[in-house]
Image: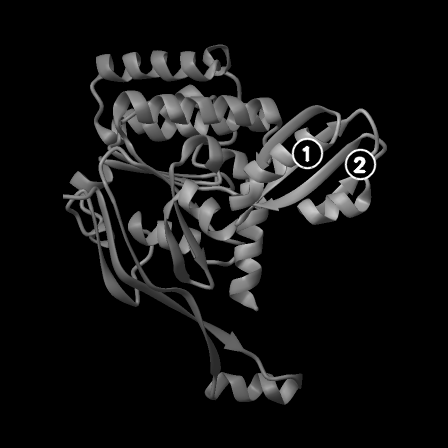
Amino acid sequence: MPAVVAKNLTRIFKSYRKRPGFWGGVVGLVCREYDRIEAAAEVSFEIEEGELVGFLGPNGAGKTTTLKMLAGLLHPTSGEARVLGHVPWERRDEYRRRFALVMGQKNQLWWDLPAIESFELNREIYQVAPRDFQARLDELTGLLEVRDKLRVMVRELSLGERMKMEIIASLLHAPSVLFLDEPTIGLDVISQRKVRDFIRHYNTTRQVTILLTSHYMADIEELCDRVIIIDRGRIFYDGRLPELVARFAPHKLVQVVSRQPIPEEALRSLGEILERGESTVRLRVPRDRVGAVCRELFARFMIEDLAIEEIPVEDIVREIFGQARR
């Protein structure tokens, strides 16, 4: 049985629309008008145990709403969901002990206390045996390199250190399913790398099922083989990341360094010119012509170096969103 099952999950919010002026406010007291906002519309997918899946979408696409329904924080307007065999919004204790939700823009640690005291509170809440708690704490703080920060006030920690503590707090009860909502948001490059390495290690060694949302495409490219893309509350792609690239990026980038300038006419016959310098050229070439173009370049010109690159995934996803909205 899949670890996470979502079937036609729909969540509609009602937003009060106030009429202008004083009398508009008076009328609104007795006769209110509402706008219906479809935050999630018939969202359906399945995630197997141990999978690490990327959940992509622009701001307001419905990612966080979907995660909150799967975590039981929101009741859907319609649809069904099962996480580890449980209905999330029933909020049963046996379910709450088996999942964790980490939100990069929300704090769960007490701001004016050292992180270790929040951890001890979580140990009591989740009824973790002291020996298991200490073993997990030692392992997690060692992997994330924050063991010396346990007794520092949370408000005095750097953003990266605080995010690591948030992750530790969510893993001390050894959840089987982990929902990560923007875990690297606002972090510097080094902190992002450390958090990504930790997520990969934890998923590999513990076989924890992870659903990850992020605006940093480096997170998705390095961690996720499968991606689910949502926009305006609806899923329009669910599949492997390489298939996404092949389907929505029919071109590759060819970077050429030559000993002498290559005539523009010759370049235009090979592909679309993106950049051109005295000795360097960057071309966009159809996938099925890359081999032929490279052979022709080496045969006709004095090539010093040649590199073939994929279109950045970030550009592909941006183009997908643009097409969907158009």
User: Residue 11: x and y, percent?
Assistant: 35, 65
Instruction: Say whether residue 126 is left or right of residue 35.
Output: left
User: Residue 149: x and y, percent?
Assistant: 50, 15
Q: Residue at x 47, y 87 (%)?
A: 30
Instruction: Say whether residue 276 is left or right of residue 306.
Output: right
Mark 1 residue element: helix
Q: Residue at x 76, y 41 (%)?
A: 275
Quarter of the image containing the C terminus? bottom right
Vertical side of 28 occupied by 215: above or below: above
| C-alpha separation, residue under disc 1 versus residue under disc 2 | 9 Å
User: Residue 18: x and y, percent?
Assistant: 57, 80
| Residue toward you, 211 or 312 | 312
| Residue toward you, 108 or 199 | 199
Vertical side of 184 occupied by 265: above or below: below
Which amino acid type is marked by label 1? Leu
Q: Residue at x 60, y 35 (%)?
A: 186
Q: Are discs 1 and 2 less than 8 Å apart at CB?
A: yes
Instruction: Say whether residue 115 is left or right of residue 175.
Output: right
Q: Which residue is mark 1?
A: 297
Q: Residue at x 81, y 30 (%)?
A: 279
Q: Which residue is mark 2?
A: 262
Which amino acid type is marked by label 2? Ile
Residue furthest to the right in view is: 278
Mark 1 or mark 2: name the one nearer the start of the chain.
Answer: 2
